[in-house]
Amino acid sequence: MTEPARTTTEALAATAQAGSGFDPVLPGIILLLPLLGFLLNGILALVAGSRSATALRLAALAEPDSEEERVDHQHEVGAPKRATHTLPTWIGPGVMLLAFVLTAANFLRMLGADLHDAVVISYWSWMPTGALSVDAAIQLDQLSMIMMMVITGVGFLIHVFSVGYMKDDPGYPRYFAYLNLFVFFMLVLVTGANFPVMFVGWEGVGLCSYLLIGFWFQDREKADAGKKAFIVNRIGDVGLLMAMFILFSTFGTLNYGEIFAAAPTTLVYGGGVVTAITLFLLLGAAGKSAQIPLYVWLPDAMAGPTPVSALIHAATMVTAGVYLVARASVLFALAPVGAAAVATIGALTALFAATIALKQYDIKKVLAYSTVSQLGFMFMGVGVGAYAAGVFHLMTHAFFKALLFLGAGAVIHSMHHALHATHKDWDAQDMRNMGGLRRPMKWTWIFMWIATLAIAGIWPFAGFFSKDEIIWYVGTSAPFGPLYAVLWGMAVVTALLTAFYMTRMMILTFHGPNRTGEAERKHLHEAPLTMTIPLGVLAILSIFGGWINVPESVRNSFFGGFGLLPMSEWLHDWLLPVTAAADAIRLEQMGAYAYQSPIGGGHVTWGFIATGLALAVVILASRLFLSRDVKTALEEGEPTSGIGKLLYNKWYVDEFYDRIIVQPVIGISRFSWRVVDRVLIDGTVNAVGAVSRGAGWFGSLFQTGQLNTYAFILALGALALLGVLIL
Amino acid sequence: MTGLFDGLVFESWILHALIWLPLAGIPVVLLAGEERAKEVAFGWTLGLFVVSLGLWWAFDPAGPLFQLQSSVPWVEMWGVNYALGIDGISLFMILLTTFTMPIAILGSFRYIRERQRGFYALMLLLQTGIVGVFASMDLFLFYVFFELTLVPMYFIVGVWGGERRIYAAVKFFLYTALGSLLMLVGILYLYWQANLANGFASFHVLDLLGTPLSLTEQLWLFGAFALAFAIKVPIFPLHTWLPDAHVEAPTPGSVVLAAVLLKMGTYGFLRFVLPFFPEASAHPTVVMVMLTLGVIGIIYAALVAAVQPDAKKLVAYTSVAHMGFVVLGIFALNVNGLQGGLVVMISHGISTGALFLILGMLYERRHTRRIEDFGGLARVAPLLATALVLTAMASIGVPGTSGFVGEFLALVGTFEKYPVMAFLAALGVIFAAFYMLPMVQRVLFNKLDRKENRTMPDLSGREIAVLSPLLLLMVVLGVYPAPVLERLEPGVRAIVEWVEEGQTGALRSAREAHALEAELATEELDGPGRALLHRFEGVEPPLPQPTRTEEGELGRSALVAFPQTPAAPTEIFTVTSGDQD
Amino acid sequence: MVDLLFYVFAAVVLGGGIGVVLARSPVGSLLFMLATLFAMAGIFVLFEAHFLAAIQVMVYAGAIMVLFLFVIMLLNLGHDFRKDFTHGAGMIAAFAVAGLLAGLLARQLRGTGDHPLYAFFPGPEGMDALLAERGAVGAIAHPLFTDYVVAFELTGILLLMALVGAIAIAKQRV
Amino acid sequence: MLVEALVLSAILFVIGTAGVLIRRNAIIMFLCIELMLNAVNLSFVALSRYLGIEGQLYVFFVMTVAAAEAAVGLAIIIAIFRHYETVNVDNFNLLKW
């Protein structure tokens, strides 16, 4: 992925594609830019790290007995900023901006072209061996282009936000190095032209996620969270690996183009192989996208800096699973069981996570479970064959969830400053300690309400269009009719729960009386411009982002401004070249049954019902929580009984996993080491040694060193010999 | 460039030089004096590495299978030859050796404080032995070199090791000596049989190839050879010498042990066991046993590694796990698997070598290897932390590093025939994270809560010089392994064709060419070459020997159980899941 | 006459042998040994081995025994003879071994006189002819310097090495 | 006379053996060994009367070896005596590692 010298190859490939009318501009450079940013920032980070390490050593030498100074991650105020701090401010967001501009240019070109086949650019031969030949190749098509737009666009905004959020952190250059590296791997993930290259990005983002979650690694819990994320993700990765192996042994190649072209003829519809492939892919996707049963890492991942949560754990990386299913849509279309599994997992996760979110007090945890829940929606979408809807929700979710996280970041930033100013030992993320923040943080408040309404699915915000589309498709999908009816019910309930807990979060955070305390109150203030401007941009996207995929009937109705919108179902049409094959298979296999609504009613009717219900829930929840007298975290403590306790403790899933998986594995490990290795194997080896040593000891008894004995034994020996000879 | 190399006539002397120049360096090191010994040894090995790079050009990837061949009679009566030659597999093993040696020596500058001259002399002796092992084309010569490596390693562990060094050294010695003695018996038997078949005495590998042996004989010989190499690899359950040897060995000893010495075992499988005993190697039971042991090794070693309190022991167990992937790849018996196994070997050499070096650096600073004695080091030693994280990632096979390429290919190869095995082995990927990340976390992250650690210095210039080539290679091999794979492929393909397709392919051509050449040299027209051709003609039908008939049926039933081609993809699962065990 | 002489010499040999074993002081043992050696030389003469008889007296009795005597004197041995004998079990075992040995030898010696193989060898007449032809020394010297010359040279080397070794071992450490 | 000589040789050999086994003075043990050598010599000489001159040749060699053995053996005894002040074999166990 790192060879600029191959531009000739690019040019050649581009000319080869010229017939399709799409001539990509420097796609390799888009990937290289974040990598370059990583390298530059990485060097700066090492320089800065070495410098602070020296300072630390000197301090330790000066006061060898002192306890380690209390590490404060976010503040090292006062000292003049060095180059290692000022340069990343420009490098980090700078490369992102350039990458975004290039991506946008390519996007516009692609818009203008009539592109049916993906543009594959092969840079070099990566793993040529035997029958397997894997190239380091990228693929530009409608799906990867949308993903690239989201990644570079939202990524750029979050980089800018980070400048404000992280500027006082001693690890500032390191932070940007990781962030750039993440973007690089994420781009590799979405542009890879075959499964192994995608897997490079897949694990690469996992690595960056690990590093960024454990960014403040001095804190044991945060380092643990990073580790957990990595290991849980690896479980999913095994699924992906297995899927690749089956694909290779079935198709003899791992390139997207060849596999998806050959799949409809090679694979039997609903056959064992394709079902196995899709289930393994689902395992991989569930790991990365935090679905049941592998969702447990994502809430813990909130230990990372908040912009990281926004970028990685809301907008981009966690949606990789959805991308994967959409990418492999042909396979999922061929495997109705696999697809149904995706949808079911999605629905279960969505509902399950939403219930947990109801009772969380950490603002980031609420958002984390909300993310898990929304990812479940996306899974439902791609699971029922509505790939465009899934990707659509992925995109709008990237906007409003990034906005929510960044807003939460701004709130935490502000709370942290305030608590830090008075050295109060409170949790800066606990909503019970907040309240009434709408006055000091007006813009953040407005933006976050926009996002909340968007996620709650209220017209005209983005989430309304995307989420309701998914719900609608879940209701209309076949062939397991009753199952989908259940899923549909779960989706609706989840949507209402979403509206409820999001409103709860907003009310607890921004409304009601302020609970921080007198001294802190005057330190609460609005975040700096570098942080609010990205919020604003995202707010705009959260409002209008949904209008790119409005069904024709809706467009002509009240919701579409009675035809005011210039286009209908744009995203759906845009993605058609990618999803057409899958759609064709579904149509062929299910016929008219494919998109037949078992529930009845049209888009518009359901639109009214959905908005109405969501709005009602928002209002209800607002009234409920506004009227409640909220106590601070210290006063209230943890819920001690009932369903509240169960939800607060996240259904005890972590404890359950710990009990049935982690502890047994550790137990087996200890057993293997202490018993099998040391006692059985080494015992045998040492026993053999002991036997020979014993024989030696026995023999040494005869070696007295006394000449007499030797003479005697000699004589006996001679006698024996003589006896044998004579007798 | 090419002209220059032609002028040097590399191919005529390079192998001899790589074997004997280290030995020639010993007097130089001994004469250099206690103070200068390390610099001299480093310079010497570095020079050798530079020379060995010539192999890259001297070896023609498109050329014949075995290149740079030369043969001088040694003990004519027994047919022992000083015969050298390399294929792509040996090429990289030799390069890995010459590359590792200067790094190991440079990494030991501060670690080895006593009897330095002796130490570096032994390291040079070790290099002679290892390169000899990889360059030998004569089984007798190979055995001599194979045993020769034991001696310096024994002393390196036993003299410069840790507290329980004697125990570890003796255990190491006895384990390996036991195995290789059995192999010696096997070698002699094989030699005798080949002698009968050829009509002349020879230990030359190409003369021993294709020796007619009944399946029973093959299985016995396979057992004798495999035991020796399995101990060296080491394959579960013969691995317990390794953690002890690694923990007690001084850093450079561990590095060489992990990076190169273990590879002699897997190399032995590839060069000798598979080609000499093709039917035994492809025997379904044998394959299942080896694969099972490989998989057990991967998972078991990973689990055991996860609970080690001693960082060096942890890394030692990871070696066992990695070598499990190699075994898996080898006994997948297809190009992908073997290639993968070989890349794992190279990659493991680099990444585990680097891990041992880093742990050695920590030990030099803190005189402890216990994981719990560290913590938060990333703050005081960011360079070391970066190196350790990158190395750990390469070790657990994160894509983009060399570890991934190897494991991926090995698993792809295995999956083609043994999906369940591949699945179980893939679980090792999880366990790899399960042992490596907690170690990284407890060493680098968490609170910097020990005051001894707070004054720990970061990497020095020398240490950066030691680690950076390794780190660079990890990434380069992960991103662009194609040149390596290209050079490995002919050798790998030759083995696969030989074993799987009734002793055909490049190995057979090499065998025939060798015999005809010998015949031409003696101008004896009805000599061994002719006899050999007859022999092969006799073997021409795929399953000709009388003992093979019932075996053939076994083989066919195995084919049903483990389909080699995805002709009926739906059956992969239905059949194997039911019949595998 | 010859028989008589033989029995006399035999009696001396046996008496000397027993004396060597039982004498209290080393010097006594040595003197008994000397008597044995002289009597043995006599027996050699009876068997027409005149040359051997001569070197038996000169080398064995003369040189080697003097060397022993020299060492005994040098080390001033012989004052604590009680410890010189093994006691109890050792003694019993020794006699048991000796008895067994004697029994085995006796069994082996039964019927030695008329072994059929004797017919193939020269016999006393042939030996007499040889001695008459070459003389007592020449009879030994001829094969020694022809067929057995290598062995002869080797014994020379052995003696040289023994010489060097004896000096090296006995030399006072510096 | 041959049989008698052989019997005498056997008796002398047994006496020598018994001497080696019961005496503990190194020098006397040596003398007993010489006794055994002489017993063998007697057999050789007696048999050579009937079987040819080679028997006497062997006696010659045995004597040479005996001389060499005596020289080295006595040297060892002197060396040991110098260290231990005794030649009683009970007192040293140098042969034990």
Image: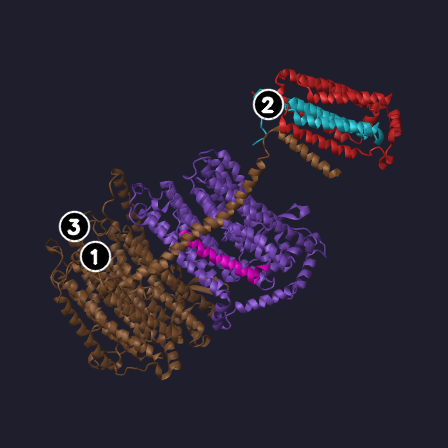
Chain colours: A brown, B purple, C red, D cyan
Which residue in the protein does label 2 denote?
D80
Quadrant where the N terminus of chain C sits is: top right
Residue A257 appears in the rendering? no
Q: Dot 2, how many residues are within 10 Å of its Cα: few (below 14), some (14-19), or many (20+)?
A: some
Q: Chain of mark 3?
A: A
Tell me where residue D85 sits by quadrant: top right
Point out which mark residue A423 bears.
Answer: 3
Give, as a single range, the part of the protein colored magenta.
B280-305
Looking at the rendered structure, the secondary structure element under dot 2 is helix
Q: Amino acid at mark 2?
A: Ile
Residue B275: x, y in percent?
59, 57
Q: CA distance from mark 1 to mark 3?
A: 22 Å
Q: Are marks 2 and 1 on the same chain?
A: no
Residue B257: x, y in percent?
48, 47
Q: Is residue C166 above or below residue A24?
A: above
Residue B53: x, y in percent?
49, 49
